[in-house]
Image (cartoon, rainbow, N blue to C red):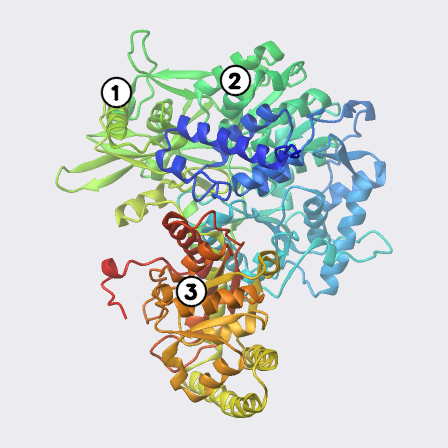
Amino acid sequence: MATERHPDPSETVRQKVLSILRAFVAELGMEQAAHAVSLDASLDRDLGLGSLERVELILRIEKAFSVRIPEHLVAEARSPRDLAGAVLRSEAPGRPLSLERIQTIGAATPPPASAASLPEVLLSRAEREADRPHIYLPQEDGTEQKITYGQLVDAAGAVAQGLLEQGLRRHETVALMLPTGSDFFFTFFGVLFAGGIPVPLYPPVRMDQIEEYARRQIAILQKAGARFLIASGRVEGLGHLLQPMVPGLTDVTTFEALRRAASERPKVDLRAEDPALIQFTSGSTGLPKGVLLAHENILANIRAIGQAAQIGPGDVGVSWLPLYHDMGLIGSWLGALYFGIPITILSPLTFLTRPERWLWAIHYHRGTHSAAPNFAYELCVRKIDERAIEGLDLSSWRVAFNGAEPVSPETLERFTKRFAPYGFRKETFFPVYGLAESSVALTFPPVGRPPRIDLITRETFERERKAVAATPTEPSPLRFVSCGAPLPGHAVRIVDASGHEVGERTEGALQFRGPSTMREYYRDPEATEKTFQDGWCDSGDFAYLAEGELFVTGRRKDMIIKAGRNLYPQEVEETVGEIPGIRRGRVAAFGITDPEIGTEKLVVVAETRVEKEEARRRLIGEVMEKVAAVTDIRPDIVSLVPPDTIPKTSSGKLRRAALRSAYLKGEMGPPRRPAAFQIARIWFSGLGARLKQAFSSFGRLVYTVYVGSIALLTIPPVWAAMLLLPEGKMPARLSHAWSRRFFSWIGCPVTVEGSAHLSQAGPSVLVANHSGYLDAVVLMAALPPGFRFVAKRELMQAPIIRTVIKKADHLTVDRLDFTESVTTTRRIEEALRQGHSILIFPEGTFSRFRGIRPFRLGAFKVAAETGRPICPVAIRGAREVLWPGRWIPRRGPIRVTIGKPIHPEGKDWRQIVRLRDLAKAEIVRHAGEPSIDLVAAGIAKE
């Protein structure tokens, strides 16, 4: 009786995940992405799913399987197969956080009002209450890691000892590329204890944008003059990749490698005027600038915040904000440290994947103060399921800071309406204004007052820059949210283009001054001089004052002047973002000069997943109509672009200037290079810097002579040995050993990835790209000696190569056209039966043109007919070492990537083509060269 077969649970999960994904992309109108859905499709590159779409997809998968996927698996997932694996490793959802409440620890002691530096604040706390909990770090399993003041001092002291042993000198800069976690807190104060200046950097998030990330971090590290880069273990390798391009960066290390046993708490000698922090601005209008803050600046700002926000010893903080950003670092963490109030700090990833956990943290810990940018409140409204917040109580929340980006009146209304049933009050909202140049905060409204929204006449404001109150019959008034009055001891003013102060309700440039104001832009005297005017610091924003309160209207560099009217992009972007089919928060408006019409053109760039031409035309028409209805100005140009085209800063702000520049250059477009390709480009950039410094034309000549000498000295004895050896295994092993040593001798290391795939596949047909003279030698070095080449018969005319082919029992064919040769096919089949893998270059030849040529079908026909798997092999770097047509080698790394076996599913023509296409796609992905069409490229066939 036949045994009943039960379906594989893993396969069932995978197919269900694919089904959910197909329905999701179809709902988004992603026609091309729907065709690309497969288990190994890239969620970012192939399917174009951004962070918000991933959140929605994860929620649907969790609901379908009744599981809670751990956050680290969400972050690491790169394909539907990864998501299915995450489901299989997940458990039923439990409590989102521990039920322990911070308020049971009692009120804090008064803040150290006389402290002159941040380390003095911490040491004072640790001396008075070393065991008092300072930070709670929620973990995925519902527990929390607790950090006391004493633990923070001890760990920071250990880091400081390590830095001093490594030679860190006073006031040298140390970059921190660390995620939210205990390592960041320990390292930040460790740098301060050692007398250094911490420079927080945001760690990489999206590997498909790693090249752009690297460029920005290199610029920051260079401008900061960083001596050390302290990274987490996961990104330490990237730090080493960047090191050659940052002069003065002597070491890339980790918290674990730095900490030393410290016999006593550190002795810190810092003055109020000493530098405490370099905070790089988000760079929304250009390259980031380093804001240098002294200890007295930060402490003055924190003290003013405490007074204006009425922070007391019984308060509790909750934050998920990034620690490289001023609102998360100073406004949340260091503020809580100064006032001695406990703070629960979630990672930004936790919030983005589980926004409800932010609210639950406030619920469980009875949080009173918490801050977020406007988009976070909008995300909570749109993405949190009702079932995820059953029993939620937000009644303890007293001050909900809303800042770091323009505050939307609509968001305030939507959030209040959505969460009023859970105890949230409209007077809890606290719209604020601040900037890094003022440490973090500059103006606050009164505590306990509902947000003040100013309705003004559009026409008068846009033409005369006067904020005249709108009448009730105004069809489309402008709405601006008050950010309150200056903090105690601080001042603001509004000036015109000549620098003269303007009157009430007149828009102009916003300037400020006060004890929180930065010292300078670090190592940038020109930018510093431009920013300060008679002791006032320019904010770069437009605003007006009304009844002593500040209303920020927009960035000065973003203003669009059209037909005599001053337009601000935020309103246009919010209007367009409400249109179905447009990605909310992924719209940018800017102006471009048009000399012919004597004014600016209004350009709207909007991301969408709509792909059908007719639907796109309708969408453009709707954008035109909506913008015209709200602003009375029709956009001149509406450009619909794919997801991830519009660049953003690390804090999520639109980089309109960068987009405008890309638009004018015709270079708009999302990064679609595989992460491996981008990393290799970064690596080669560093290699280029080293080679440029080390070699001149004479140096290259010397290297060429050296390589030639190695070849002349080693090839003849190896050839002689082969002539004496019998055919079979020994010649193959000899050629393998010589090849590996040859590349080592000439400084071109061959690294191999995916070797395990060969043992998984068993005897198989290996197919590799062919980029130059070295490929066969590279593969002899990289692959185990048991494989057989299928080489062109012409090679038998070369004495040395003929010996290698005959002695190692490699196969030869007529130009690889063996689809018509029964004898050749039988020889290949016989070798496979004997347990040997066969390696074929399906391109047949190579040329000086970079790119992977069309694959011939012979190898794939053999695989389909024999039932043997195809193993794609990608060679990268061999072309750069010895470019076809040139005989001057260059030193460089060579990487061989062995892909997963691709098994045939039949013997028909479709299967042969399928094997070819899958193998080529895998090779293109790892080889660092594009797939080329010989006809389109104008390259003659050999």
Q: What SS does tag 3 mark?
A: loop
Mark 1–mark 3 Cα distance, whole angstroms, equals: 64 Å
Give the image location of residue 811, x and y in percent.
Answer: 46, 74
Give the image location of residue 98, x and y in percent.
Answer: 75, 26
Q: Residues within 10 Å of mark 3 (few under 14, many from 20)?
A: many
Q: What SS does tag 2 mark?
A: helix
* Image mark for residue 459: 1
Q: Residue furthest top?
A: 472
Residue at 44%, 19% in the rendered image: 409
Q: Examine the rendering and report whether any part of residue 749 can be seen.
A: no
Which residue matches tag 2? 415
Q: Amino acid at mark 2?
A: Phe
The one nearer the camera, 533 or 686, is 686
- Discs 1, 3 touching: Cβ within 8 Å: no
Q: Nearer the viewer, mark 2 or mark 3?
A: 3
Lower sequence index among marks 1 and 3: 1
The one nearer the camera, 636 or 552, is 636
Seen in the picture, residue 722 relative to 188 is either above or below; the reply is below
